[in-house]
Amino acid sequence: MNKMIMTPTMLYAKISSLPPAMIKEVNDFVDFLKTKQKKEKIKERKFGCAKGLFVMHDDFDAPLEDSKENETIEEITPIVKSMMGSFKVPEDFDPEKAFVDGLNEKYSK
């Protein structure tokens, strides 16, 4: 089958005959095609291409000095009570129990 090659002038004539809403769609499609073309130009990364650029220390997963993870419940309780501000908090308030009770309530439904 003999197909005629579409020239920019012929394409312009076709687009010009469309109503404004469809011209906007053509414009959006052209933008999409340009974006797609840019993405295709990105080379696929090869495994190990960053080798030697980063250093992983032996203690990378050790707790930080200022980490709050190692605080005891005794250290956390006054903080939680002070954060609750104007709420009336019982003296025997246990934030750990409250947290667990909250999880149980949330996921037991």
Image (cartoon, rainbow, N blue to C red):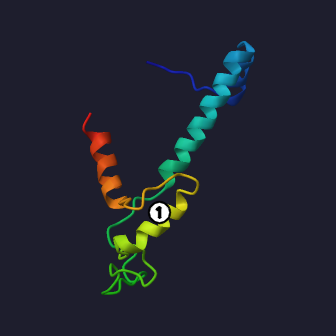
- From the image, which quarter does the C terminus lie in? top left
Image spot of residue 30 (x, y percent): 62, 33
Q: Is residue 81 above or below residue 37?
A: below
Residue displayed at 35% across by 53% down: 98
Residue displayed at 30% across by 56% down: 97
Residue 57 found in image quarter: bottom left
Q: Secondary structure at mark 1?
A: helix
Q: Is residue 17 above or below residue 39?
A: above
Residue displayed at 32% across by 41% down: 106
Mark 1: amino acid: Val
Residue closest to the far bottom: 58
Residue closest to the far front: 91
Residue picked out by circle 1: 80
Q: Is residue 12 above or below residue 41?
A: above
Image spot of residue 104 (x, y percent): 27, 45
Residue 91 found in image quarter: bottom left
Residue displayed at 43% across by 18% down: 1
Q: Is residue 67 visible?
A: yes
Horizontal side of residue 18 vs 5, given as left or right? right
Choose between 86 and 98: the one closer to the eye: 86
Looking at the image, how many numbered discs can be counted on the residues?
1
Choose between 40 and 74: the one closer to the eye: 74
Choose between 9 and 37: the one closer to the eye: 37
Choose between 32 and 107: the one closer to the eye: 107
Image spot of residue 80 (x, y percent): 47, 62
Q: Is residue 14 visible?
A: no
Horizontal side of residue 76 vs 12, given as left or right? left
Image spot of residue 65 (x, y percent): 43, 85
